Amino acid sequence: MNFSTELIFALATILLIPIYYYFTKLRRIEKFFENFPNPPTVPILGNARDFRSGPAFFKSIHEYTRKYGNMVHIKIGPIGHVLLASDYKFLEFLLSHNKLLTKSINLKFLEPWIGTGLVTANGGPKWKTHRRLITPAFHFKILEQFVDIFESAGNILIQKLSKESGEKSVDIYPYVTRCTLDVICETAMGTKVDVQNSETSLYFHSVKEMCRIFLARTTSILKRYDSIFRFTKDYEIQKKSVEVLHGYTKSVINSKRKELEETRKEGNYSDVDDLGRKKKKVFLDLILEATVDGQSLSDEEIREEVDTFMFGGHDTTATATSFILYCLGQNKDVQDKVLEEQEQIFGGEKCPKVTYTNLQEMKYLENVIKEGLRLYSPVPLFGRRIDQDVEYDGKIIPNGVGVIVFSHGIHMNPEYYPNPEKFDPSRFDNVEGKQPFAFIPFSAGPRNCIGQKYAMLEIKCLLSKIVRNFELSPAFPRHEMILAPETVLKSLNGVKIGIKSR
């Protein structure tokens, strides 16, 4: 074969590859999407012009759902297709399926930090093994031990907010997010980062930078590609941030492993300390000790899961807590009922010794939290990727279809929640077991949030403490939040409320 023949063959191959891809995969996907309504598009961009910013994107997908229904075809760019889904029947099918477990491809942007832990891993053998191994760490007997940590961090939060008490309004979110990061560090690793008392915490700064870069990469056409991203300033910031985060986690793992090995050598397996008190075990202790079929996790796998817990466990609870405080400030009647329940449990004490049992008794507050999670879902949407041909409702969903699970869409559906804009905790008085896929703030099915009981307990602890100590009111002047889905749902102009010491 001479040079000219080789050149012609190479060019023909280059041309045939996209043609082959189109007819074998893309065309199947396009034909599938013909079954669903599609908002008006423009050439090349598709619907991308509606997603100019986070608030515009959030507004657009809500408008799509209202206008076109609960299953909407969104076209992104010249060949991108995604299904925006908030249909109950479809969500039940997808989220309860034991094989459709692959998350959105965008999560790969988190891998430099959290690797392929529970959040980012595909639903293969590694994910299943890790899920089985880590699940016992969220048993209620373990969660009981965390209440003191929630309380201790919450007391610092009260001290900080007391300085802001008075006539002026305060953006509650920065205070709450520092508190929840303190909590997650101590419950995950058993270490005190104390970001509530440190304005210059390098660890806190690195966490925030990694969350920002993840958002930047998911929303940028160019930064999505590693070959381009590595030449940007954010790439250098990411390297430094990952070095800080991994360095801290690894040092704690090494210290804990050394401590565990010394304990084994000494034969000291007691669950109580020298004073007869039950030893507290944090997340890291438990996964260092855990085995599945005789196998334990490597240090790198443990690092991935601890960092995953750090990523998934602080911003979600901070956002949820902040939005619920905003709702309580706007709804004095609900706030009064929360306070009444607190007084029934603790009398007039503002700072009682709170136990796990006390938190379980807060039934009305639990409904308040659920209603807050419905109205301001911390994770308002998340992605799934269909990685095999599967039949649904008499049609084949082809391998390669992307799905946006629009959890906030079904949470705001009047079919399931009449007058959905209203903050009404009584909705959850008698819903146990009814239509579980209409309330999915923690997702559902095999890939639901493993830490949802932990999150509920922490949120309940912080809210109850704040309501006992402060009267909450609407911000003055009036504050309308500008919502945008980032790593979690955020208010771009803060979460402002009025607070006054009781």
Image (tube, rainbow, N blue to C red):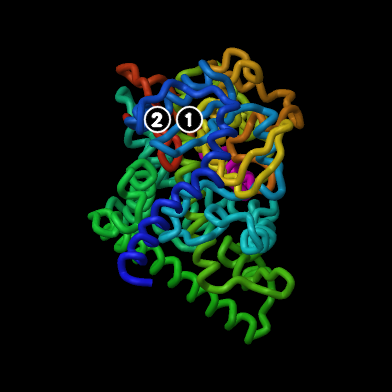
Residue type highlighted by circle 1: Ile
Instruction: Give the percent coordinates (x, y) of residue 346.
Output: 62, 35
Instruction: Classify the position of the N terminus by image quarter.
Output: bottom left
**CB within 8 Å, label 2 to label 1:** yes
Residue at the image position 29 percent from the left and 63 percent from the top:
240
Residue 450 magenta-highlighted:
yes
Q: Is mark 1 on a helix, strand or loop?
A: strand
Q: Residue 74 carries which label?
A: 1
Q: Mark 2 points at which residue?
A: 46
Left or right, 215 with reference to 256? left
Left or right, 438 with reference to 250? right
Residue nearest the observer in this picture, 272 or 41: 41
Residue nearest the observer in this picture, 228 or 123: 228
Q: What stretch is highlighted in magenta?
A: 447-463
**What whole-number distance in Å separates the C-alpha atoms at marks 2 and 1?**
8 Å
Residue type highlighted by circle 2: Gly
Would residue 156 be visible to someone looking at this image?
A: yes
Instruction: Give the percent coordinates (x, y) of residue 341.
Output: 63, 27
